[in-house]
Image: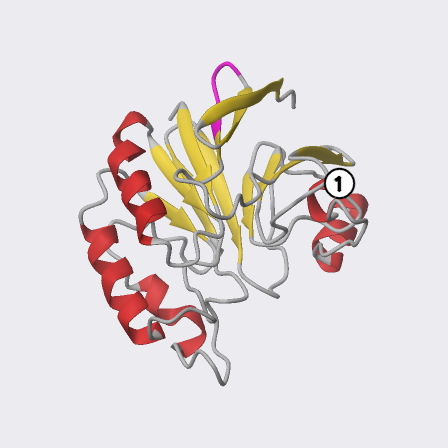
Amino acid sequence: MTKLLHVSDLHANKRWFAWLADHAEKYDVIAYTGDFLDNYGRESLGSQVRWITDWARVLPRPLLWCSGNQDVESEAAPVSCGGWMAALPKTEAFGHTNAVERPGQSFVRLDWQGSLPKVLSGDIVLAHAPPAGCFTATTKGGMDNGDLNLGDALRTRAVAPWLVLSGHVHSPARWKDRCEGTISLNPGVNEGAEVPNYITVDTVTRKARWFRDGELADVVSLPH
């Protein structure tokens, strides 16, 4: 595996999902870090689940995902705690360890309000909320909406994963930051844009590229 496409928080935006399906073939794997659904939209949640399932069926590349706060069970969204996502076609099975191996790269999934499983130094973690205490988790207004448990875990564990791919904070102060030995990436959300914000990661050259409004906005190196 060399090329990864990371998106988050599409919130049942059909135009953005269509864009993702159209561009997925350029990459080896798609990493989607939560909030497939829009709990506050006009379309029913059942209808959203049905067409997102149909969308995943024709996706040309494997899909790795973690659940977001709008994907899990609540009074407004009785969707079996995100269990519908486990049945999505073309998705990779993480298994009981919440880890999955792709050629040359291992991934670990942290579901919404879950605890971080065992990680290795080269792992890529999929987590909806960025680690607390990072600029990727902090809004431009200064509010930290990150995952406190994830932030604590990354700062206290002897072994640090390579990357945390996340979302949740729509307007982060920065799209890239570090949490001790781990790099945190969050593409953010640009409401009303024709193309969703996204990040590409090349695991061989160790480069990440951030795209906003469909245009390249920044390129960074990703050392271990």
User: Dividing the image into 4 quarters, which one contains the N terminus?
Assistant: top left
Residues 181 and 42: in front is 42
Q: Is residue 1 visible?
A: yes
Q: Is residue 149 left or right of residue 117?
A: right
Give percent across and percent down for residue 8. Answer: 48, 47
Looking at this rendering, what residue extends furthest in the top direction?
205
Q: For label 1, count other residues whose C-alpha is less than 10 Å away and answer few (under 14), some (14-19) or many (20+).
A: many
Nearer the observer, 97 or 124: 124
Q: Nearer the viewer, residue 214 or 153?
A: 214
Q: Would residue 56 appear left or right of 220 to someone viewing this image? A: left
Q: Which residue has dot 1 on it?
A: 135
Q: Residue at x 57, y 43 (%)?
A: 188
- In which quadrant of the rendered image does the C terminus lie? top right
Q: Number of numbered discs present?
A: 1
* Position of residue 62 measured from the top left corner of the image (x, y, whole percent): 30, 42
Measuring from the top left, give residue 152's x and y in whole percent: 78, 53
Q: Amino acid at mark 1?
A: Phe
